[in-house]
Image (spheres, rainbow, N blue to C red):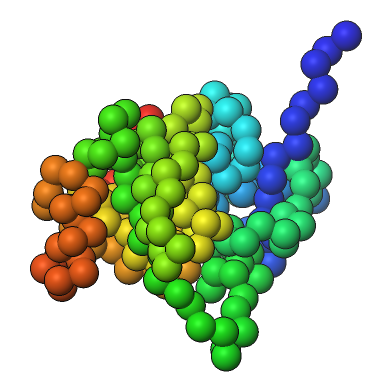
Amino acid sequence: MPRPKKCRKVCQMPPMREFRPVGERPREDAVILSVDEYEAIRLIDKQGFSQEECGGYMQVARTTVQLIYNSARRKLAEALVDGLPLRIEGGDYRLCDGKEAYCGCGGCRRHRRGPAKDAKEERNMRIAIPLDENREDVCIVLARAPYFLFQDESGETVAENPAAQAQGGAGVQAAQFLVDSGVTELITVRCGQNAADVFAAAGIKLYKSVHKTAAEELAALAKGELEPLTRFHGGFHGVQ
């Protein structure tokens, strides 16, 4: 018995679902691009995601994304080169249910500005720092840091990073975890552009880490000595 396909998460249906070439004779035979193929094209070619990050959003493996993406590109080429109509329909997908605190992929309107907040609600400061295995030193990577230190008015806590062992899209998954954890400030050595976009949409301030230990960074932030982190790198395969 063949293994059932896992439905790919899609943020919303495409606004335009049919395209026809301008020509002297109409063509009725159309190239069918599935909705999940459209989503892969949108995320990778328009939003600039890596295949791993795309897999993280669509909640499938990177190898699956590669198959979807390659199929979509072949169909687009066929429609363009042969002058065929293109129609978007069908596929193995499920629409985003809107229950996530933040989506960040640029397609789901209800998530674009991060989780909704009451205008009168005060946002208490909650600082996060990626930690090494010793739980004291700042980890030089954000996405696959073993732990995160959180500091707020109630004190300090250390939590495991659920994205550390992710097969793909670790940077965005780690960013989503921090957003869901209510972080308002993040101190980190480096950050990928896609994760930075998630932080920006959620209103999280980023600061450049310059010290070895998290304790030193917290003290420096309290004194106003840390500079904002404004330079971000592109996506990498596996590490951010």
Quadrant location of residue 116?
A: bottom right
Whether 11 is drawn above or below 189: the answer is below
The location of residue 135, given as percent across then percent down, is 31, 36
Quadrant location of residue 207?
A: bottom left
* 196, 116: nearer the viewer: 116
Q: Quadrant of the C terminus?
A: top left
Taking the image as shown, residue 144 lies to the left or right of residue 60, namely: left
Residue at the top extreme of this rendering:
1
Whether 198 is drawn above or below 162: the answer is below
The location of residue 2, given as percent across then percent down, is 83, 13
Whether 179 is drawn above or below 131: the answer is below
The location of residue 159, given as percent across then percent down, is 46, 42
Q: Quadrant of the N terminus?
A: top right
Residue at the front extreme of this rendering:
154
Whether 181 is drawn above or below 162: the answer is below
The location of residue 239, given as percent across then percent down, is 33, 33
Name the residue located 65 percent from the left edge and 71 percent from the top edge: 110
